[in-house]
Image: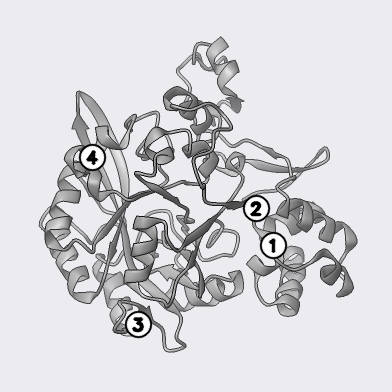
């Protein structure tokens, strides 16, 4: 069976998230998006846990289900801030639990290290090595994945506080890291250039890191699994071995907030070559720029641009459907005009990912949708929409000719 999963979700109890991220809304928009599995998000937070216990029932496969049968996985994210090798480190890790009992033990463990009630993504002063070792002592079925691995401030390989390799970060616990999450500002082709990824020591997965349930956030990045049946064991086996991990769904890396170098407050961005010429100094404020993902890849890659490992997993590079409709109409993604077109498309074809990836052009046109919109959907499917790269916390901006798409 095919399962399209988004396993990096937050609840309304995490910072900078929508107050409307409920179990019900996540299920509603996951179905509209075309997702078949979600991470439950922030399970160690006491109020989120209360919501989980009230609204989800665990089956014998380690899957949490709503009354309507929609599946969730036990999942949370933690932020680790500590010093190692004389440098400040800040890494976000995704944590997955096989069942309620182990989720309880993880919660107890995290609670022994700090408060759990102030933020759905709690901060701890522990190292990645210690966290992985401690969690694996609880149960080997617990899965730990470095989140948005390339972003400057909280990514495993980030320019500001990350490491140059998995081995440098996790030491003797590297053996227990089976995958890295690409994040919006990078895609698998960029990560293939790292020897640990190219050699198969770690697979690449992709999830949204959604802070709201809207369709242009949830599932904007996801992983496609092909497994015999939906179970925690089968999902984790696919992540660890690559067998059953069929593909990832990515946004164009330029769309992410940290692809290029620059300063958001200065309104200045640059590619790696220009940054080098400027010696990393912003020409506006004369201070060091935030070095983005594109530059960081060049800095630590072992292989040249365009390198492919043996039998690489395919990936789809697409913008959310709201973005495509907004680009064609020249209005905001959240506007009523975009929602009207979006809802008509969903009513006709069932879900967003089918529209973005599968529905033939002739079928789209045959249902009377605007030819320019259909052309743009196909152009998006072929990764031919130009995106001005994001930088220093600023999303990238899609272009229609000389016309700039509106992002929120």
From what the image shows, is residue 46 above or below residue 252? below
- Count residues near mark 3 (Cα–Cα under 10 Å), then give few for <14, some for 14-19, many for 20+: many
Check whether the beta carbons of the residues at disc 3 and disc 1 lie within 8 A of each other.
no
Q: Earlier in the sequence, mark 2 or mark 1?
A: 2
Check whether the beta carbons of the residues at disc 2 and disc 1 lie within 8 A of each other.
yes
Q: Is residue 41 in sight in this rendering? A: no
Q: Residue at x 89, y 61 (%)?
A: 371
Q: Earlier in the sequence, mark 1 or mark 4?
A: 4
Residue at mark 4 to residue at mark 3: CA–CA distance: 34 Å
User: What residue is shown with label 4?
Assistant: 170
- Count residues near mark 2 (Cα–Cα under 10 Å), then give few for <14, some for 14-19, many for 20+: many
Residue 263 position within the rendered picture, expressed as x and y whole percent measured from the top left = 52, 27
245 left or right of 78?
right
Residue 370 position within the rendered picture, expressed as x and y whole percent measured from the top left = 88, 64
Check whether the beta carbons of the residues at disc 1 and disc 4 lie within 8 A of each other.
no
Q: Residue at x 34, y 44 (%)?
A: 201
Q: Earlier in the sequence, mark 3 or mark 1?
A: 3
User: What residue is shown with label 3?
Assistant: 56
Residue at mark 2 to residue at mark 1: CA–CA distance: 8 Å
């Amino acid at each position: 069976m095919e399962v399209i999963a988004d396993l990096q979700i937050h609840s309304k109890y995490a910072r900078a998230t929508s107050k409307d991220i409920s179990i019900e809304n996540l299920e509603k928009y996951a179905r509209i998006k075309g997702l078949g599995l979600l991470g439950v998000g922030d399970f160690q937070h006491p109020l989120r846990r209360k919501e989980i216990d009230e609204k989800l029932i665990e089956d014998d496969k380690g899957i949490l289900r709503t009354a309507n049968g929609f599946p969730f996985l036990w999942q949370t994210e933690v932020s680790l801030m500590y010093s190692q090798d004389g440098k400040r480190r800040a890494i976000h890790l995704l944590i997955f639990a096989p069942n309620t009992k182990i989720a309880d033990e993880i919660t107890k463990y995290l609670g022994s290290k700090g408060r759990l009630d102030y933020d759905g993504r709690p901060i701890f002063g522990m190292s990645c090595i210690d966290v992985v070792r401690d969690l694996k002592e609880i149960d080997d079925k617990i899965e730990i994945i470095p989140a948005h691995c390339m972003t400057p401030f909280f990514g495993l390989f980030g320019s500001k506080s990350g490491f140059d390799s998995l081995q440098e970060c996790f030491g003797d616990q590297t053996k227990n890291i089976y995958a890295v999450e690409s994040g919006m500002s990078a895609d698998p082709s960029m990560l293939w250039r790292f020897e640990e990824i190219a050699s198969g020591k770690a697979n690449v997965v992709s999830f949204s890191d959604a802070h709201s349930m809207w369709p242009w956030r949830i599932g904007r990045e996801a992983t496609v699994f092909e497994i015999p049946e939906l179970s925690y064991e089968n999902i984790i086996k696919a992540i660890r071995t690559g067998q059953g991990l069929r593909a990832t769904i990515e946004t164009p890396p330029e769309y992410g907030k940290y692809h290029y170098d620059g300063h958001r407050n200065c309104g200045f961005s640059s590619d790696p070559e220009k940054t080098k010429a400027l010696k990393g100094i912003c020409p506006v404020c004369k201070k060091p720029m935030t070095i983005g993902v594109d530059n960081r890849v060049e800095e630590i890659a072992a292989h040249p641009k365009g390198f492919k490992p043996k039998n690489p997993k395919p990936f789809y590079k697409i913008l959310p459907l709201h973005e495509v409709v907004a680009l064609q109409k020249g209005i905001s993604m959240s506007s009523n005009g975009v929602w009207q077109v979006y809802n008509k498309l969903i009513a006709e074809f069932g879900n967003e990912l089918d529209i973005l990836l599968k529905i033939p052009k002739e079928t789209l046109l045959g249902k009377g949708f605007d030819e320019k919109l259909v052309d743009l959907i196909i152009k998006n499917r072929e990764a031919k929409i130009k995106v001005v790269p994001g930088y220093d916390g600023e999303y990238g901006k899609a272009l229609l000719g000389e016309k700039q798409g509106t992002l929120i």
